[in-house]
């Protein structure tokens, strides 16, 4: 009788342990999360935004005087510490895009450094004068000594944003 009870117990155990109902596939289960953004300037959406690597390639094909309507995503490297009236986006490989805002119509939070953004607007290349560079350096909160060391104009990957989305 003990053998029959043991055999019955093992049979029931094997039946339930082999049952496939409710089994999860191997690998990690990833919960899909909705990304939320804070919006600045014109209302834009995140669709059709290109990567920083793709944006670098676009900039390579621009000459001074050319403009390109485009949307791309990048992390903020630095924001104007006076008003939030400009930002620098990190494009990787020690390259950055200097972003100002259309018609001085909106500003970014001054503590947004490091946040991921999507910018929509016009990309172009230009040479920034020494006076402008010194002004931007002052806005960034740099010392008078650092500002005085700026003595040459700079070729810049520029962008005029009409709308910005910042990950919340």
Image (spheres, rainbow, N blue to C red):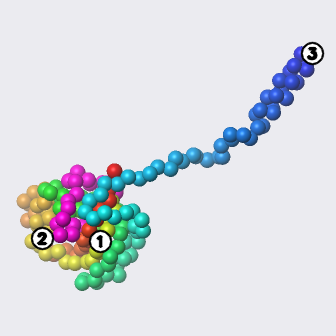
Q: CA distance from mark 3 to mark 1?
A: 83 Å
Q: Residue at x 28, y 83 (%)?
A: 66
In-front residue for pair 41/127: 41
Left or right: 93, with 148 as reference point: right
Q: Count residues near mark 3 (Cα–Cα under 10 Å), then give few for <14, some for 14-19, many for 20+.
A: few
Between disc 1 and disc 2, whose residue precedes? 1
Residue 31 on image: x %, y %: 52, 47
Q: Which residue is mark 2?
A: 132
Q: CA distance from mark 1 to mark 2?
A: 21 Å
Select label 1 or label 2 by which is in front.
1
Q: CA distance from mark 3 to mark 2?
A: 96 Å
The answer to whether residue 95 is visible is no
Secondary element at image label 1: strand
- Quarter of the picture holding the N terminus: top right
Q: Count residues near mark 2 (Cα–Cα under 10 Å), then give few for <14, some for 14-19, many for 20+.
A: few
Q: Which mark is residue 121?
A: 1
Left or right: 163, with 134 as reference point: right
Outermost residue, top side: 1
Residue 141 on image: x %, y %: 13, 56
Q: Is residue 82 above or below residue 24?
A: below
Secondary element at image label 2: helix
Residue 88 on image: x %, y %: 25, 63
| Magenta span | 99-116
Q: Residue at x 72, y 40 (%)?
A: 21
Secondary element at image label 3: loop
Q: Which residue is mark 3?
A: 1
């Amino acid at each position: 009788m003990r053998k029959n009870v043991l055999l019955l117990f093992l049979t029931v155990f094997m039946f339930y342990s082999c049952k496939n109902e409710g089994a999860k596939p191997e690998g990690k289960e990833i919960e899909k999360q909705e990304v939320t953004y804070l919006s600045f300037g014109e209302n834009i959406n995140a669709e059709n935004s290109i990567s920083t690597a793709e944006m670098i390639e676009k900039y390579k094909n621009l000459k001074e005087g050319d403009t390109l309507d485009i949307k791309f995503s990048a992390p903020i490297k630095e924001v104007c510490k006076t008003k939030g009236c400009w930002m620098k986006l990190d494009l990787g490989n020690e390259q950055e895009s200097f972003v100002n805002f259309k018609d001085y119509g909106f500003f970014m939070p001054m503590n947004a450094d490091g946040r991921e953004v999507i910018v929509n607007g016009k990309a172009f290349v230009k040479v920034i004068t020494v006076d402008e560079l010194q002004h931007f350096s002052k806005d960034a909160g740099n010392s008078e000594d650092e500002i005085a060391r700026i003595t040459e104009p700079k070729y810049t990957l520029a962008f005029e944003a009409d709308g910005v989305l910042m990950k919340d």
